[in-house]
Amino acid sequence: MREVLPRRSSARPAPGEPDANFATNLAALARREGWWDLPAFHAPGRSYTHGEVHTLAAGAASVLAGHGVEPGDRVLIALGDGIAWVSAFLGAARLGAVAVPVNPDLTADDHAFMAADCQARLVVSDDHLAGRFGGCAVLVDERLTRLAADAPAGPARGVTGRMPLYAQYTSGTTGTPKAALHRHADPARYMRAAGAGVTGVTRDDVTLSISKMFFAYGLGNALVFPLFSGSSAVLLPHRAAPADLAEAVSRHRVTLLYGVPTAYANLVAECDPAPFSSVRLAVSAGETLPAQLGERARDLLGAPVLDQLGSTEAGHAFCSNTAWSDEPGTIGRPLPGYEVVLRDKNGARVTLGQGEIWVRGDAVMIEYLGRPEQTAKALRGGWLRTGDLAEYVDGGALKHCGRADDMEMVGGITVSPIEIERVLAEHPAVAEVAVAVVRDARGAGRLRAYVVLGGPSGPGLEEELIGLARRRLAPYKVPRSVEVRPKLPRTSTGKLRRFAVREGKW
């Protein structure tokens, strides 16, 4: 049952307890470390220093308060990446309100659902989206930034690190999206683990996150890590084509590149290495990075591509390869601040073979906003059940084996499509592949592989791929057919929609 959400929290720092407000602490950090006049964000048309960002955020807090936002209220942000997004998020944080970032490219029904689900007090969006939010008050992004530039600093709410800072919706691959609620203290925690702990980000780095800030991965990459390190990030408001990404990397001399496997596949297919000469590290997340694609991406970028695993519920990555320890073909090892175990369906620990990943750490979500029953299913005694499957490889790193709900049943035998996809992805003509059981005309379930081409192929591609599978896999894991598609069905965050693959309709 959906519960009515409380709008206020009386939690304040106790006497002598440090104020943990995310926005004001970041501003103080920038002053203390001498980052105030260094670039923080490169947006189309101009760049902004750390000082300008924090000054705008303080003004945005005043504007939001003038529109009725109070501590504990939800501020839904439906914008592309840009200075208005940053100002709205930090402004809400300064007030002690809860930011709720959502994808601006969702449908009108999705936006109306999310505004109602989080009980938004105010929506910040583009003008053309203003009528989508079920009667919620809307502040247009251009008006926010214009008013914030001239507004006095808004009130700074003293908070504890346990108080809610933001709620971020899951991607909805397995059902209705749910908003994972995170604290003011959480970003600093996953900065230490997945920022400094993975790339060693410093003030000299320039980041480009292909994944946007409405996605947990992009929020950390493009907002949290730069503001905590004194570095800068390139903000692209819309989904960029590979050529545009290459141009932005070259123009801004990007050193840290973050993306999902699909984005790297597109770069490999359409770009030359020259624009990427400044990149020192790349990171991949969202779903498993196939080994062959990882090799091609490393060749293109001239830099390691570090595979990792995280989730909206965990805040960011909790298991990753790092700049100091990279084991291609794995998702690395648990990051500092997180504990990871594998368990079977009964909750018993697994040391050999596949198990579901359970993770615990200080940055794991408080709850799914207003959904106590689903929260209780996901959080068990301080542990988060991720739904991801993995197994240990020699040396102790983890190999991702897909999602527990992604398994296919073939002739009464449970099969992981990830294993089959990894084999087929080794073919040089294959850029992306998805495997599922599809019903034939008789209603019998048959394995079918859907592939997106990334290189030259001849009329015998289907026979070549099936032959490759036969040489490498048990007979029951070999696809019966192969179908070429221009693209695979994916969520707005780049994750594969397995249910759509099973239906064969997209």
Image (cartoon, grey):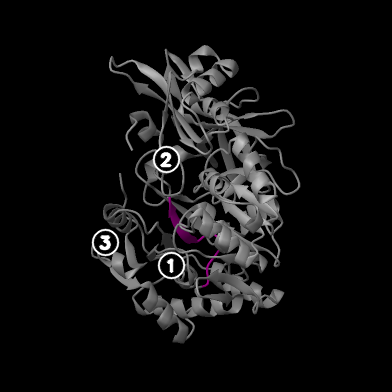
Where the N terminus falls, by quadrant?
Answer: top left
Q: What stretch is highlighted in magenta?
A: 158-169
**Residue 296 picture quarter:** top right
- Taking depth in this image into account, of 319 and 183 the one nearest to the observer is 319
Which label sits in the foreground, 2 or 1? 2
Which residue was labeled with disc 2? 487
- Taking depth in this image into account, of 146 and 385 the one nearest to the observer is 146
- Which amino acid, mark 2? Lys
| N-term-proximal mark, 2 vs 3 | 3
- Which amino acid, mark 1? Ala
As measured in the structure, the alpha-carbon distance from the residue carrying label 3 to the one carrying label 1 is: 22 Å
As measured in the structure, the alpha-carbon distance from the residue carrying label 2 to the one carrying label 3 is: 29 Å
Which residue was labeled with disc 1? 97
- Taking depth in this image into account, of 404 and 446 the one nearest to the observer is 446
**Residue 24 picture quarter:** bottom right
| N-term-proximal mark, 2 vs 1 | 1
Q: Position of residue 399 (x, y in %)?
A: 62, 32
Disc ID at residue 132: 3
